[in-house]
Amino acid sequence: MLTLEQKKVIVSEVAEVASKAPTAIAAEYIGLTVADMTRLRQEAREAGVYVRVVRNTLAKRALADTPYASMQDGLVGPLLLAFSQEDHASAARVIRDFSKKNDKLVVKQVALEGKLLDASAVETLANLPTYEEAVSKLMAVMIAPVSQLARTLAAPHAKLVRTVAAVKEQKEAA
């Protein structure tokens, strides 16, 4: 049994994480073994995701003054809370990948920047590129016109060199 002080610590910890997190996911974990939960926590830790199993009454108090207050009504049954800490999609990726391996983990709620989404949005959210991937795609788009211009400007010179080389070969052959 938790003491009042322990409960206050849990509520403040979850509230602090929730206030900074860009994404929150509530998932039902009925039927997961201790080994499964340990594996999930390890994968989450490696991905920079805060995962916590919290009593619903404590979770409701913790989320009350955060952007995720809209999740309070859906906190029913044994749930774990997952908060992205680095990028928007990290929690969704961890939960989606783990639930593919273990169908006992069921997503109940997804919230992005405080807005409650449909539970199926976890797939869409998980498919978002990471920050590094988005930057590299942007750089590729930005550099494409410049590299095309360089190839276009170099083409006449290259064609002239090939033509002179072909004329030289013809004269040597004759």
Image (cartoon, rainbow, N blue to C red):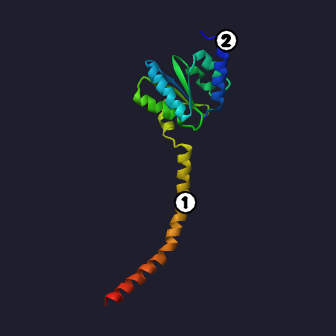
Q: SS class of the residue under badge 1?
A: helix
Query: Which residue lies at the image location 58% right of the left edge and 24% below the top edge?
Result: 71
Regarding residue 160, the answer to whether it shows in the image is: yes
Q: CA distance from mark 2 to mark 1?
A: 58 Å
Q: Is residue 24 left or right of residue 66?
A: left
Q: SS class of the residue under badge 2?
A: helix
Regarding residue 67, the answer to whether it shows in the image is: no
Dot placed on the residue nearer the N-terminal end, 2 or 1: 2
Disc sitting over residue 106 in the figure: none
- Residue 42 in the image: x percent, y percent? 50, 29
Q: Is residue 154 above or below residue 61?
A: below
Tell me which amino acid carries mark 2: Leu
For the C terminus, give its image quadrant.
Answer: bottom left
Q: How many marks?
A: 2
- Residue 109 in the image: x percent, y percent? 53, 26
Which residue is denoted by mark 2 in the rendering?
4
Q: Quadrant of residue 168?
A: bottom left
For the N terminus, give its image quadrant.
Answer: top right
Q: Is residue 155 above or below residue 147?
A: below
Q: Is residue 61 left or right of residue 97?
A: right
Tell me which amino acid carries mark 1: Ile
Disc sitting over residue 143 in the figure: 1
Q: Nearer the viewer, mark 2 or mark 1?
A: 2
Query: Which residue lies at the image location 57% right of the left edge and 19% below the top edge?
Result: 54
Judge the density around disc 2: few (<14), some (14-19), many (≥20) Cα neighbours within 10 Å. few
- Residue 21 in the image: x percent, y percent? 62, 32
Q: Nearer the viewer, residue 38 or 30?
A: 38
